[in-house]
Amino acid sequence: MDYAATTPVDPKVLEEMKPYFSKRFGNASSLHSMGQEAKKAMEYSRSKAADLINAELREIIFTSGGTEANNFALKGVAYANRDKGNHIITSAIEHHAILDPLKWLEKNGFDVTILPVDKYGLVRPEQVADAITPKTTLVSIMAANNEIGTIEPIKEIGEICKDHDVYFHTDAVQAVGKIPIDVERMNIDLLSMSAHKIYGPKGVGYLYVRNGVKIDPLLHGGGQEFGLRSTTENVAGIVGFGKAIELRKREMYKEAERLKVLNDRMIKDILKIESSYLNGHPIKRLYNNANFHFDFIEGESLILRLDAKGIEASTGSACSSTSLEPSHVLLAIGLRHEQAHGSLRLTIGKWTKRSDVNYVTKVLPEVVEKLREISPFKKSW
Amino acid sequence: MYTEKVLEHFKNPHNYGRIENADGVGRVGNLLCGDIMILYIKVKKNKTGKEIIDDVKFETFGCAAAISTSSITTDLVKGKTLEDAMKIDNKAIVKSLGGLPPIKIHCSILASDALKEAIYDYYKKMGRHISEGLERVHQRIQRDLEKVKHMHEELG
């Protein structure tokens, strides 16, 4: 029930990767046949990655994951376009892998505008248009939110950016392989993606960089990845990523239908619990994401009690974070502190069965009830 | 992350609930994370005429650490004289649980504060003299509680 955090590697993906550890271990930069074999396998993955989002081969730069792709996009574009301006626009509900690099850029002389979102977590495209100044070089808005599942109007935002001649980056880690993404149709200039969210291995991702976008590399060295990301490539990881993407393309639509039915059912059943609320948009949301808050109880307690019953979930509660701050996403959609405190995220995936969902909807009301018995909030102060 | 003892108290907390006609009630709030704890005590005199905590219950809105520190505190004070109960500090609570993660130490302070505040409430109701030290603790707890209430109403 925590597929948005990470997913297991598909056995088919693992099989594909295996030979590239010790049998076909070649360095893709070597001229001999083993090196060229590695190179070929990597390029095959690149073609799969490009194909899924309607990009060109040359536009996919493999990275160590989503966080690196985001850092690369933001810092790379910010520094390469300093002659044009120093202003970047983003939203309040981005992942920390966007907000933290932007904080760092702010410290280094860049200006960042953080757009607020509505109660569903939606960014309004007009807000983006209003925020653009002659100094704006980049807009970064996520395709779908990792916590509340809200799907952002990226096509509209992409159009606005194109009209204003500003680069548009989207963190699509939760979206690619789940919903259709087309970089041409959606006017996306840069896009971050990660393998471990789609049944691929951890430690590999990519940044899509549209041909002609001015960007500086993060890693300088041997000139791999078209000179944009030096370091010997993670061949096995990239091969696995390619296989995972290939499988997504094949399974995505069928799985979407199945999961949507399960998810809708789960949401409907869980909302029968007294004083429970859905976080995020009722319709414009990822079909595998359900996020709630329950009055009078705290999320970490909820997670640990569910864990004891064999259910893995996550929360935006302050108590579960290292900073003791509640989720910035939940606060941004207007939840009060104690509401964010009582949040629960359930995300389903490929191997979630109907019986799993039924089990959750049976156990959750009992657990909520038990914690409410302990809580002082059930009565007035 | 948590010790077995913490998880044991979290899964099966002792003495949770409310005492309707409690002799002392301690309400405390945690500024760091917004947790709330209420401790109820019932006091009676033992054979030697000393006041002891005859019954104790808690209600907590918070994480596993907050719930387990509440639970163990009720175990630690039950049957103790008020004087001895006052000596139980957060270190004793942490020790009884076999330790807490550093970021959760504040939960043990919440529990020891709730205990002191319940005893303060009892003394106050009985018109007893309150030591300067306990009065200072009470003032601090009340200031924090106001801020936490404000946090719950305003934050976000």
Image (cartoon, rainbow, N blue to C red):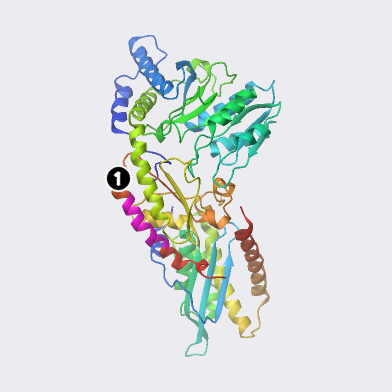
Residue A1 is a magenta residue: no
Residue drawn at the location 59% of the way across and 57% of the way down: B32
Magenta region: which residues?
A: A357-368
Residue under label 1, please give it. Answer: A353
- Label count reads 1
Between A208 and B77, the one lying in front of the other is A208
Q: Can residue A224 be seen? A: no
The type of residue carrying mark 1 is: Lys
Q: Can residue A270 be seen? A: yes
Question: Which percent across, then down, holds residue A117?
Answer: 59, 42
Q: Is residue A222 left or right of residue A85?
A: left
Image position of A315 with respect to A377: above or below: above
Image position of A67 with respect to B115: above or below: above
Callout 1 secondary element:
loop
Between A100 and A21, the one lying in front of the other is A100
Residue drawn at the location 58% of the way across and 19% of the way down: A213
Quadrant housing the C terminus of chain A: bottom right
Question: Which percent across, then down, holds residue A173?
Answer: 47, 33
Between A155 and B2, the one lying in front of the other is A155
Residue drawn at the location 50% of the way across and 81% of the way down: B42
Question: Which percent across, then down, holds residue A339?
Answer: 53, 56
Image position of A148 with respect to A372: above or below: above
Residue drawn at the location 48% of the way across and 88% of the way down: B46
Image position of A77 with respect to B5: above or below: above
**Quarter of the image where one finds residue A270:** bottom left
What's the magenta bit mostly, secondary-structure-wise? helix
Q: Is residue A112 left or right of residue A95?
A: right
Classify mark 1: residues with Cα within 10 Å, few (<14), some (14-19) or many (20+). some
Q: Give the chain of mark 1.
A: A
